[in-house]
Amino acid sequence: MTPTRRSVLAGLIGTGAVVSASGLALVLQPSLLVKPQGALLVLDAQQYSILAAIAGRICPGGDGFPSASEIDVAGRVDALLDRLPAGTAAEITGLLGAFESPIVGLLLDGRARTFSTCAPDEQDGVLAQWRDSRLPQRRTAFLALQHLCSGAYWTHPAVLRAMGYTGPSPGRAVPT
């Protein structure tokens, strides 16, 4: 039987819940918190920080393109989650907890640190491990986060301008 998206995310959420309930994740190392650029609608400060770290690695910017932090990709994803069914938003927030968890990292990859406190090259390695995992749940989870971050990034007006896109019709500028 092929696992569904919902069953995959539910399994990851369950793992994250076990880790969170034990409190061991915070004993090993707390998350590196980033101050949100605006009011949060769905995510809490820790979830926002985890997502900001992931987005920073998926959409680093450069060569005239803004970074994920410059255009607040994590805040844009938070706004998107607010428009989705509550169950879907809960799946994503649970996934962020599993992704950050040093216990999950230790069990699956030998990493006993939270994702947000890893160095950038270590974060790239963690993302690659999720992307290339033999476990379909991890690959699906990676794709969900990659698509959320990429969608929020590549639809931002500053990124559209950096690509040279000026709007849907000749002479119309991209709204700010």
Image: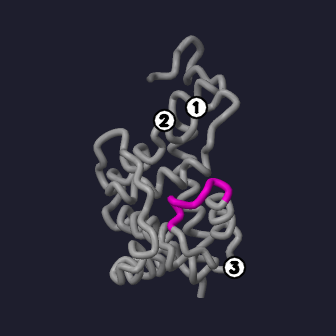
The reply to whether callout 2 and callout 3 are in contact (CB within 8 Å) is: no
Which stretch is magenta?
114-121
The kind of residue tagged 1 is Val
The reply to whether callout 3 and callout 1 are in contact (CB within 8 Å) is: no
The kind of residue tagged 3 is Arg
The kind of residue tagged 2 is Ile
**Up-down relation of residue 158 to residue 35 (above or below):** above
Residue at 41% x, 49% y is 34
Q: Secondary structure at mark 3?
A: loop
**Up-down relation of residue 157 to residue 53 (above or below):** above
Q: Residues within 10 Å of mark 2 (few under 14, many from 20)?
A: some
**How far separated are the C-alphas under marks 1 and 2?**
9 Å
Q: Position of residue 60 (x, y in %)?
A: 62, 43
**Up-down relation of residue 11 to residue 121 (above or below):** below
Q: Position of residue 162 (x, y in %)?
A: 63, 26
Residue ranking furthest to the bottom: 1
**Residue holding disc 3:** 134
Nearest the viewer among 102 and 151 is 102
The reply to whether callout 1 and callout 2 are in contact (CB within 8 Å) is: yes
**How far separated are the C-alphas under marks 3 and 1?**
34 Å
Checking the image for residue 103, the label placed there is: none
Q: Position of residue 151 (x, y in %)?
A: 54, 46
